[in-house]
Image (tube, rainbow, N blue to C red):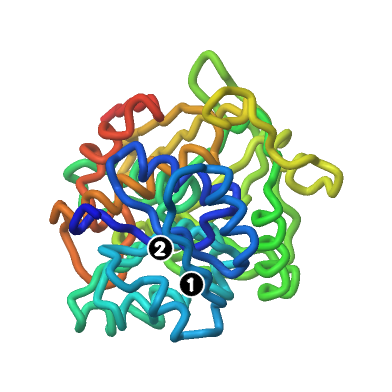
Amino acid sequence: MTAGRMVTVYGAYGHTGRFVVARLRDRGFVAVLSGRDAGKLKALAAELGGEWDVRPAPVDDPAALDGALAGAAAVLNCAGPFATTAAPVVEAALRAGIPYVDVAAEIEANIDTFTEFGDRARAAGTIVVPAMAFYGGLGDLLVTAAMGEWTSADEAHIAYGLSSWHPTAGTRAAGAVSRERRGGRGVRYTEGRLQYHEDALPALDWPFPDPMGTRAVLGEFTMADVVTVPSHLPIPEVRTYMTVEAARDLSAPDTPAPAPADTNGRSAQTFLVDAVVRSGGRERRALARGTDIYAVTAPLAVEAVDRILTGRTRATGVASAGRIFDAPDFLRALSPHIDLELHR
């Protein structure tokens, strides 16, 4: 086994976890298959063929989690809801003295990670990167790249131009947990803090660049970017938007799960993420285009693990993608998975 290249994937049999396992293998890592369901792990190993290290670990069993991480150089948590899994797996990573990366899109779960583990991870010299995914990680990288040499901004806007959104079972479960934790309220980041509210989401038009063009979006369709961006950038207003069609797909109970449309298992869904920062009347923009928000999470998360293990980081403790990595360089490394444009 290649020394320093073994990565435990917790939730390996999930929709995103499968993409992550495949990407780790493509990048020369050795993936340890872990998660809560032993049967699903064994089925995944049989489906993949060859020899796989399978280590079931209930999230409430610290000894089993320690065994799942034994000998690994890092752990990559793909198992939601992260309100349930993040803290126990971070605890196991701290005991093992290895980096932790997750793909959590849950706002409250990400807040918990920053709040509960910031001091401990920093004191231990360990790296914890939450929300290293399409939501939270990509938006943070785009805003950070657009900022350039700016040290602050008045506002940041991240508009998600999704052609559709067929949610996975994990997305639906995580959304249910978040709604329960909020008491059904909405959330926004304004005046330098998170605020919960019961207002209806405003409908407006967003001027996406061609060929998408201006599209109807829901404003204050708040994603994990409102945690990751303000965690390191002094921007008092951070707002996210979602195309109306995608929002309708997500809310409809009968929208099917994503279906593969190519040999890599990616769906036909396309996305354009438009990040705009404004300061004193000036404006800068970063855009990312690609296919399948779940599939693109894999190169994001695996690139993060690779950079952590090779020392290409700027911080220890709990840190978002834009804080710990060189954002423009990281985004360029994601080619051909993401097409990037920077307008400063």
Kind of residue at badge 1: Ala
Q: Which quadrant of the rendered structure holds the C terminus? A: top left
Q: Find numbered disc 2 in the image and state the secondary structure of the residue it sits on.
A: loop
Distance Cα–Cα, label 1 vs label 2? 9 Å
Residue 218 in picture, x, y percent from top left: 67, 43
- Judge the density around disc 1: few (<14), some (14-19), many (≥20) Cα neighbours within 10 Å: many
Q: Which quadrant of the rendered structure holds the N terminus? A: bottom left
Residue at image point 26% right, 31% down = 332
| Residue 228 appears in view | yes
Residue at image point 61% right, 64% down = 187
Name the one closer to the observer, 99 or 186. Answer: 99
Vertical order, 115 against 241 (above or below): below
Of pointers 1 and 2, the one earlier in the residue sequence: 1
Most extreme residue toward the right is 254
The image's mark for residue 86 is 1
Question: Where is mark 2, residue-wise?
Answer: 130
Q: Are marks 1 and 2 in contact (CB under 8 Å)?
A: yes
Q: Find numbered disc 1 in the image and state the secondary structure of the residue it sits on.
A: helix
- Judge the density around disc 2: few (<14), some (14-19), many (≥20) Cα neighbours within 10 Å: many
